[in-house]
Image: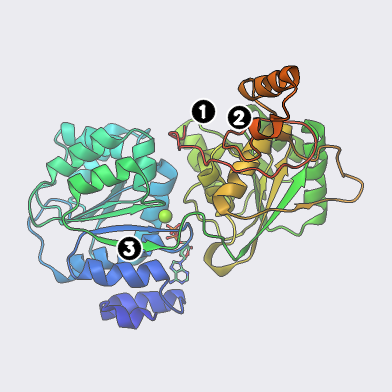
């Protein structure tokens, strides 16, 4: 769909043309007309599909065309779950408002509260914020949302997983007048809290669901390698770095200790690498992300902290040094590559400890994965087979005693519980585990 067909203002079309985008993405084509028509929206689409502009363009259009309700209050508030994501939205917004009179501020947790209070006195039209900090400012009456026209929740599922429901409610209540429009974006709509809060905050929303989170990303080649132990993973990683032609590469590990260990190992070998973890100070995190975006580091080693939303188009490879515990997290991690039409490669190391996660991911993506090998680095580990649970093992014993051949019946082939031990790859049904809040 062309941007011209979405009822966008000429000035916006000019800006988009200047950026060189050929056509609108699916979520943009579906969402923009709905928002332009003044309706509330509940939308999901996969990562990297252009959701940011799907809300920023119509928000900007509204600001340009509709008279403000008040002179001083913000007209558009965008909330994002993490500081990194909020910064990214703010970056796109800045490009959109460049050369206009509209002011925007970025309000993040972990930064100076009083400086931020002063920012509000400049009467910004747009506020991009993390929810906790914005709720704090509201409590201190540093801003009023009486004049708010559009409240946008980006990655709402993640904000709720992080426990921000009370802050979202407080912000919503502070802007409770009838002329407000609310847009909610979520990686998934199949999320109880998302549905609860949508019922609470949205007014007869139009639902837009483009594909599924677990839909295969055709621009990303996924490769899996079996490995025996930590040293084996490290040897495989060395080989990846030696043989793959990567632009920038992200490595995901399970622990912070590993992020630091691997990053220093790379540095020792003359590779520009850096570790990013949730325990770092906000300014350190900002600096590292910024340097990585500017290409000052070729390798970023991190935990799930950086798996969502971040958009760095030069990331050609993602390596899962350890598999993520939650299947959706896998999709978010590999979505750091293959951005904006580029091809990406996602490489995953699957050791004994990763096996259950791997099988869940296979189930989640509904696809049987095959394993690749590097010559000379083939391991012994070939996957795990389900171990019989004690409850099941009793029956065959009984059967033996009474000499009745009922043991086959007693141990059904397909089971839902992931409980693995052994040597060869088993054919089993897997339950995708319920999502737990992702720690920052
Ligand atoms: P999401 O929020 O859905 O994960 P983003 O909004 O971060 O995705 O967009 C991903 C990338 O795609 C960004 O670099 C963005 O500039 C680019 N992009 C957005 N819309 C288009 C488009 N219509 N054509 C080409 N690239 C686009
Ligand atoms: Mg996004």
Mark closer to the chain start, 1 or 2:
2
Residue 256: which disc? 2
Relative side of 437 to 6, left or right: right
User: Can see residue 97?
Assistant: no
Residue 208: which disc? 3
Relative side of 202 to 323, left or right: left
Q: CA distance from mark 2 to mark 3?
A: 37 Å
Quarter of the displayed picture in which ligand 1 can be seen: bottom left
User: Can see residue 217?
Assistant: yes
Whether 76 is drawn above or below 432: the answer is below
Q: CA distance from mark 3 to mark 1?
A: 36 Å
Q: Are there few (<14), some (14-19), or many (20+) residues within 10 Å of tag 3?
A: some
Mark closer to the chain start, 2 or 3:
3
Whether 326 is drawn above or below 147: the answer is above
Q: Is 429 or 76 nearer to us in this picture?
A: 429
Color style of the picture: rainbow
At horizontal 9% and vertical 57% (from top left) the residue drawn is 179
Quadrant occupied by the N terminus: bottom left
Could you tell me residue 156's position as x and y percent? 34, 46
Q: Are there few (<14), some (14-19), or many (20+) residues within 10 Å of tag 2?
A: some
Q: CA distance from mark 1 to mark 2?
A: 8 Å
Q: Is 334 or 401 nearer to us in this picture?
A: 401
Count the marks: how many? 3
Mark closer to the chain start, 3 or 1:
3
Secondary element type, mark 1: loop
Identify residue for label 1: 279
Whether ligand 2 has any atom under 8 Å from the Cβ at mark 2 is answered as: no
Task: Tell whether label 2 touches label 1 (CB within 8 Å).
Answer: yes
Q: Quadrant of residue 222?
A: bottom right
Whether 24 is drawn above or below 424: the answer is below
Could you tell me residue 300's position as x and y percent? 63, 44
Secondary element type, mark 3: strand
């Amino acid at each position: 769909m062309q941007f011209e067909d979405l009822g966008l203002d000429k000035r916006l079309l000019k800006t988009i043309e200047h950026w060189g985008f050929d056509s609108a993405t699916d979520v943009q084509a579906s969402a923009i007309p709905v928002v332009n028509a003044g309706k509330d929206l509940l939308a999901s689409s996969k990562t990297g599909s252009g959701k940011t502009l799907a809300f920023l363009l119509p928000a900007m259009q509204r600001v340009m065309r509709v008279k403000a309700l008040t002179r001083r209050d913000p007209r558009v508030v965008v909330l994002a779950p993490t500081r990194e994501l909020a910064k990214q939205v703010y970056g796109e917004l800045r490009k959109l408002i460049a050369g206009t009179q509209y002011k925007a501020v970025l309000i993040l947790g972990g930064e100076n509260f009083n400086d931020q209070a002063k920012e509000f006195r400049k009467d910004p039209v747009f506020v991009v914020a993390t929810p906790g900090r914005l709720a704090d400012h509201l409590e201190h009456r540093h801003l009023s949302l009486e004049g708010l026209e559009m409240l946008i929740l980006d990655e709402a599922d993640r904000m709720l997983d992080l426990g921000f429901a009370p802050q979202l409610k407080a912000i919503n209540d502070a802007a409770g007048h009838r002329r407000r429009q609310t847009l909610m974006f979520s990686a998934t709509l199949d999320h109880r809290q998302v549905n609860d809060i949508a019922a609470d905050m949205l007014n007869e929303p139009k639902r837009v669901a483009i594909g599924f989170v677990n839909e295969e990303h055709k621009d990303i080649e996924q490769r899996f390698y079996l490995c025996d132990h930590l040293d084996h993973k490290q040897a495989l990683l060395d080989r990846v770095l030696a043989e793959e032609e990567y632009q920038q590469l992200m490595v995901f590990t399970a622990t912070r200790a590993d992020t630091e260990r691997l990053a220093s190992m790379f540095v020792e070998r003359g590779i520009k690498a850096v570790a990013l973890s949730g325990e770092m100070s906000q300014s350190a995190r900002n600096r590292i992300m910024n340097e990585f975006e500017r290409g000052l580091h070729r390798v970023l080693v991190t935990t799930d902290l950086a798996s969502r939303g971040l958009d760095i188009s030069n990331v050609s490879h993602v390596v899962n040094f350890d598999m993520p515990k939650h299947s959706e997290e896998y999709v978010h991690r590999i979505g750091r590559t293959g951005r904006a039409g580029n091809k990406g490669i996602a490489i995953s190391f699957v050791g004994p400890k990763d096996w259950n996660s791997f099988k869940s991911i296979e189930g989640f993506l509904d696809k049987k994965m095959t394993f690749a090998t590097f010559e000379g680095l083939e391991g012994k580990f070939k996957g795990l087979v389900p171990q019989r649970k004690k409850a099941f093992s009793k029956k065959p014993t009984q059967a033996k005693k009474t000499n009745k051949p009922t043991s086959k019946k007693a141990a059904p082939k397909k089971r839902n519980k992931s409980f693995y031990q052994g040597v060869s790859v088993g054919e089993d049904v897997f339950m995708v585990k319920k999502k737990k809040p992702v720690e920052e």
